[in-house]
Image: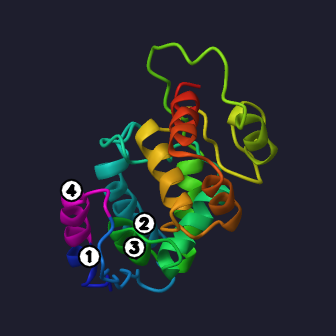
């Protein structure tokens, strides 16, 4: 029999995602994942599909986020997405909406959700010229984020990511608000706000 808690979970997540703001809240509610009938693969797929539809509320149903401070996740590295979902699920990474979303997924669904979005295509970049010359620090970033910052196993794709998301992520690493990557914290602390801004503007135009 279908878990009766599922409609409630789905409805709450839709409302929460629709009202979400980028800022983190002090306290976070933890959701109880909706579970399918044991052995019912079709039901499990339907429940996961419904949960993933909620992601479109913020991340967009065409891969283009509805809010400029929300990151692109379509076509992002699967291993990176898995790590972030686990970090939100465990509380290592802090964000009001994403804690709810991650804790509404079972541990097995975290990997399935990451694979689902990783297999999609990164959205096409809007028309506009990228800066002619990159900031010097970009060369250091390529050691992990790969050539042209297209991402790979060591680190996620940055090229074409949203400027507002990039500059805010850099700031939160630099100021110790985001702590789920010690190397990024150290790198961002070494940069001035102006340098971080220049980096974000260049990368978002790639």
Under circle 2, the secondary element is: helix
Report how far apart the C-alphas of labels 4 and 2 lie in the structure: 19 Å
Residue ID at (41%, 41%): 164
Q: Which mark is residue 99?
A: 3
The reply to whether the magenta stretch includes residue 13 is yes
Report how far apart the C-alphas of labels 4 and 1 lie in the structure: 14 Å
The reply to whether the magenta stretch includes residue 73 is no
- Which of pointers 1 and 3 lies earlier in the amino acid sequence? 1
Under circle 3, the secondary element is: helix
Q: Is residue 86 above or below residue 15?
A: below
Q: Which residue is mark 1?
A: 9
* Foreground label between 4 and 2: 4
Q: Badge 3 local density, few (<14 within 10 Å), some, or many (20+)?
A: many
Under circle 1, the secondary element is: helix
- In which quadrant of the rendered view does residue 36 lie? bottom left
Q: Which residue is mark 2?
A: 48
| Residue 142 screen position, x and y as percent | 77, 40
Q: Mark 3 touching mark 4, by CB under 8 A? A: no
Depth check: 140 or 99 in front?
Answer: 140
Report how far apart the C-alphas of labels 2 and 1 lie in the structure: 12 Å
Residue ID at (53%, 68%): 176
- Which of pointers 2 and 1 lies earlier in the amino acid sequence? 1
- Which of pointers 4 and 1 lies earlier in the amino acid sequence? 1
Left or right: residue 63 compared with residue 67: right
Q: Which residue is mark 4?
A: 18
Quadrant into which the C terminus falls: top right
Tell me the magenta residue range.
10-23
């Amino acid at each position: 029999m279908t878990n009766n808690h599922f409609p409630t979970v789905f409805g709450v997540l839709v409302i929460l995602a629709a009202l979400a703001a980028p800022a983190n809240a002090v306290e976070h509610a933890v959701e109880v994942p909706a579970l399918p009938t044991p052995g019912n693969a079709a039901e499990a797929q339907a429940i996961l599909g419904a949960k993933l539809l909620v992601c479109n509320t913020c991340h967009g149903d065409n891969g283009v986020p509805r809010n400029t401070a929300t990151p692109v996740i379509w076509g992002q590295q699967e291993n990176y997405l898995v790590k972030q979902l686990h970090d939100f699920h465990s509380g290592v990474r802090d964000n009001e909406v994403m804690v709810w979303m991650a804790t509404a997924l079972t541990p097995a669904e975290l990997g399935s959700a990451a694979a689902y979005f990783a297999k999609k295509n990164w959205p096409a970049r809007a028309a506009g010229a990228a800066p002619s010359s990159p900031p010097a620090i970009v060369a250091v970033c390529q050691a992990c984020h790969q050539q042209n910052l297209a991402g790979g196993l060591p680190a996620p794709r940055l090229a074409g990511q949203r400027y507002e998301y990039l500059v805010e992520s850099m700031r939160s690493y630099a100021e110790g608000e985001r702590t789920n990557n010690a190397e990024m914290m150290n790198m961002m602390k070494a940069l001035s706000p102006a340098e971080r801004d220049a980096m974000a503007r260049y990368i978002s135009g790639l």
